[in-house]
Amino acid sequence: MLTHTHTISLYSVCTAHLHRRNNHGAGGDKSPSTFWLGGPTVYWSPQLLVITFSIMHKTDAQATMQMICDVLLRLNLPISMLRGQTYDGASNMAGKFNGTQALIAGKQPLAIYVHCLMHCGNLAAQSALESAAPIRDAISTIIYLLLIRQMAERT
């Protein structure tokens, strides 16, 4: 019997970007999702939300920063256009000098860090999901399958 014990973390990365519009939209639409950020006729509207998942074997700031940069590259979103970043308050993420936010700010100083208040909601949801056996088992199976696929890609 061959057993392996792996410590892995599943990270989610959510990205959204703004689309520049030269007017209020089709027919002069001033919908609530369109807002003015400067200039006489330049408006921006939320364009796309993408959620990606990555298996992480190391969760230090350097590995996490590299994973985020890889996700941005795969989505064709240049880090030079990054203007915000939000994480939980863990030191490897939010650390002022060596956290992920500091490393990304070193690459793009305009990427302002804001503490993620949704982290509390995430913890509550995680606790609720873990108490529901079918959902917990489904998530465990997905992680296991992702791990198998990743190991197969290495060989």
Image (cartoon, helix red, strand yellow):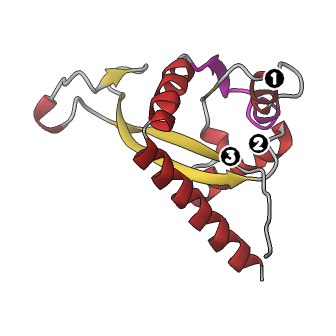
Dot 1, crowdedness within 10 Å: few (<14), some or many (≥20)? some
Amino acid type, residue under disc 1 in the picture: Ser
* Residues at marks 2 and 3, CA–CA distance in whole angstroms: 5 Å
**Gap between marks 1 and 2 measured at Cα:** 13 Å
In-front residue for pair 141/86: 141
The amino acid type found where label 3 is placed reads: Ile
The x and y percentages for residue 70 are 69, 55
Dot 2: within a 10 Å radius of its alpha carbon, few (fewer than 14), some, or many (20 or more) residues?
A: some
Q: Position of residue 72 (x, y in %)?
A: 61, 50
Could you say where residue 45 lies in the image, as x and y percent from the top left? Answer: 34, 32
Q: Is residue 124 above or below residue 136?
A: above
In this image, 46 relative to 67: left or right? Answer: left
Q: Earlier in the sequence, mark 3 or mark 1?
A: 3
Residue shown at 46% from the left, 54% from the top: 138
Residue 68: mark: 3
Q: Residue at x 73, y 34 (%)?
A: 108
Q: Quadrant of the N terminus?
A: bottom right
Q: Secondary structure at mark 1?
A: helix
Q: Is residue 84 left or right of residue 66?
A: left
Tag nearer the camera, 1 or 2: 1
Q: Quadrant of the C terminus?
A: bottom right
What residue range appears in magenta? 103-116
Residue under label 1: 91
Secondary structure found at label 2: helix
Q: Is residue 124 above or below residue 14?
A: above
Q: Mark 2 is on which residue type?
A: Met
Q: Quadrant of residue 103?
A: top right
Q: Do residues under tags 2 and 3 come within 8 Å of each other at their CB atoms?
A: yes
- Where residue 55 appears, as percent x and y from the top left, is 67, 54
User: Label 2, on which residue?
Assistant: 65
Look at the numbered disc 3 and give the secondary structure of its residue: helix
